[in-house]
Amino acid sequence: MKYVLFSIVSFLVVFPIITNCAVFSGKNSQQVQAENDQIEREQGQIEQKKQKPDKVYKGSAPGYRGPIYVQIRLSGGIISEITVDSDEDRLVGGAAMEELIEIVTELNSTDVDVISGATMTSKGFLEAVRNAIMSYE
């Protein structure tokens, strides 16, 4: 009895691995192929962006005390440097932007939380960076 139970459990574990889990994922082969094609297209787009030369892109957006202007340097599609020009308060808004520069550069993404106490400045900074990135794409 233990042997039969072991055989059934082994089959249920090994079969999905062998069949690439397509049978148990509820997807048919066309859906799996479409997803694979999409991934290949996205990888191709990433490779094209990596081949673009290093360049500085500019963006702006409204902040708490006026417009926030940013310049971002993209190296192979990755944010390597961000500089900011704004009239934001150095103790609150400026400190928030310095922290956001580190986070955005480290994560290579603007999909981050805003800094508490400097919400409008944070939103303006992130929007300015997004606008600069849009000019890259």
Image (tube, helix red, strand yellow):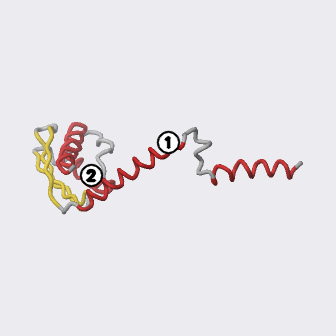
Report whether 21 appears left or right of 85.
Answer: right
Q: CA distance from mark 2 to mark 1?
A: 45 Å
The kind of residue tagged 1 is: Gln
Report whether 3 appears left or right of 58.
Answer: right
Name which residue lies at 29% across and 41% down.
114
- SS state under label 2: helix
Q: How many marks?
A: 2
Q: Position of residue 137 (x, y in %)?
A: 22, 49
Instruction: Please determine whether, in this image, residue 91 is positioned above or below residue 53.
Output: above
Residue 87 position by quadrant: top left
The kind of residue tagged 2 is: Glu
Report whether 32 appears left or right of 4.
Answer: left
Q: Which residue is mark 1?
A: 30
Name which residue lies at 14% across and 37% down.
62
Name which residue lies at 78% across and 48% down.
8
Which disc number belongs to residue 99? Answer: 2
Query: Of the residues under marks 2 and 1, which one precedes in the sequence?
Result: 1
Depth check: give the residue in front, 13 or 78.
Answer: 13
Q: Position of residue 54 (x, y in %)?
A: 18, 62
Residue farthest toward the right in the current orientation of the protein: 1
Name which residue lies at 44% across and 44% down.
34
Q: Position of residue 14 (x, y in %)?
A: 69, 53
Which disc number belongs to residue 89? Answer: none
- Foreground mark, 2 or 1, reads 1
- SS state under label 1: helix
Report whether 28 appears left or right of 127.
Answer: right
The crowding category of the residue bearing disc 1, from other C-alpha atoms within 10 Å (few below 14, some 14 to 19, many at least 20), is: few
Q: Position of residue 79 (x, y in %)?
A: 25, 57
Depth check: give the residue in front, 117 or 5.
Answer: 5
The crowding category of the residue bearing disc 2, from other C-alpha atoms within 10 Å (few below 14, some 14 to 19, many at least 20), is: few
